[in-house]
Image: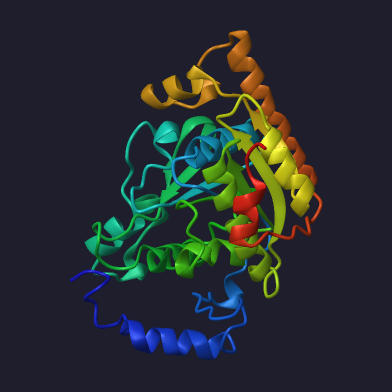
Amino acid sequence: MNLYTNPKVASHEARAARLREASGGNGDGDGSVQVHIDAQLDADKAKVFAIYGKGGIGKSTTSSNLSVAFSKLGHRVLQIGCDPKHDSTFTLTKSLIPTVIDVLEGVDFHTEELRTEDFVFQGYNGVQCVEAGGPPAGTGCGGYVVGQTVKLLKEHHLLEDTDVVIFDVLGDVVCGGFASPLQHAERALVVAANDFDSIFAMNRIVAAIKAKSKNYDVRLGGVIANRSRETDQIDRFNEATGMKRLAHIQDSDRVRMSRLKKCTLFEMGDDPEIVQIQNEYLQLAEQLWAGTEELQANPMKDREIFDFLGYE
């Protein structure tokens, strides 16, 4: 038995109907059918950040190094990987840790049999790590697993017994269960490079977060420029929409090497280039901990941003 053949899990059609009823039809935006988590599962004590961005733009690298930066500032940190590839935390743990879906299958989905140590693993500098996991490629709903992971974490009080929670979310997917972190986050952050594809994706993510903010406390925090020497296109987009650049992680081969070495940038020595990037993450963590303004960004229509981006 698995999550997708478990008789306790309702059919897709029945579940979708209940979700429409629970959301008042389309409360998260026209045509929206979202995974709604019990309101009692709110993370009341921790500062919660959800990190989105185009696939392959460096969200996991950003999340892991930001987690370490928070821990270096003395905060208790929990990082939650929300990608079925379950590779968000490997630079922290030096391994591909068992996923929530793995351990649930091991107990035939009887969550009461799980212990915290079955699915939470300690990484570098004390960062606690969880990987949601997901179904085999091409089967099932990975977003649903993310929603169940959030529920399990709350049942074990993990969203309360920490200072900072970072959700590292799959690609630019912001529908269904992949949007469930937005129901808990204080701020949603976007990772983007100074190129057409990632800014185009960022624009759509901004629209999704704006829709979610109608019903939840999440607000846009800003963009983390990554893998780019310059930020001129990101800055143009920010000026036009009301977004804000929070940090600029320089394009550096040291970042690539850290992934190959399966470690964070804080374990890569102390040469000037590494220290500069480490300090950028530390400054970002300090800024986020102190609290960022609630951005009221207004995304463009797809055709509008298509014409907007680029050079004359």
Along the horizontal axis of the image, is 227 left or right of 189?
Answer: left
**Image position of 88 with respect to 146: above or below:** above
Q: Position of residue 164 (x, y in %)?
A: 63, 48
Please give the name of the residue rendered at 37% of the width and 52% of the height, measured from the top-left corner.
119
Q: Position of residue 29 (x, y in %)?
A: 61, 77
**Image position of 150 with respect to 283: above or below:** below
The N terminus lies in quadrant? bottom left
Along the horizontal axis of the image, is 238 left or right of 35?
Answer: right
**Image position of 228 with respect to 191: above or below:** above
Task: Confirm whether residue 285 shows in the render.
Answer: no
Please give the name of the residue rendered at 55% of the width and 33% of the height, measured from the top-left corner.
65
Q: Position of residue 261 (x, y in %)?
A: 38, 21
Please give the name of the residue rendered at 35% of the width and 61% of the height, measured from the top-left corner.
114
Indicate the colouring scheme: rainbow
Which quadrant of the figure has residue 23? Answer: bottom right
The C terminus lies in quadrant? top right
Task: Confirm whether residue 149 shows in the render.
Answer: yes
As rendered, which of 227 and 72 lies closer to the eye?
A: 227
Q: Specify the farthest residue to the front.
A: 312
**Image position of 291 with respect to 15: above or below:** above
As rendered, which of 262 and 59 lies closer to the eye?
A: 59
As rendered, which of 84 and 253 lies closer to the eye?
A: 253
- The count of marks equals 0
Q: Specify the farthest residue to the top.
A: 271
Along the horizontal axis of the image, is 91 left or right of 229?
Answer: left
Please give the name of the residue rendered at 65% of the width and 70% of the height, measured from the top-left corner.
211
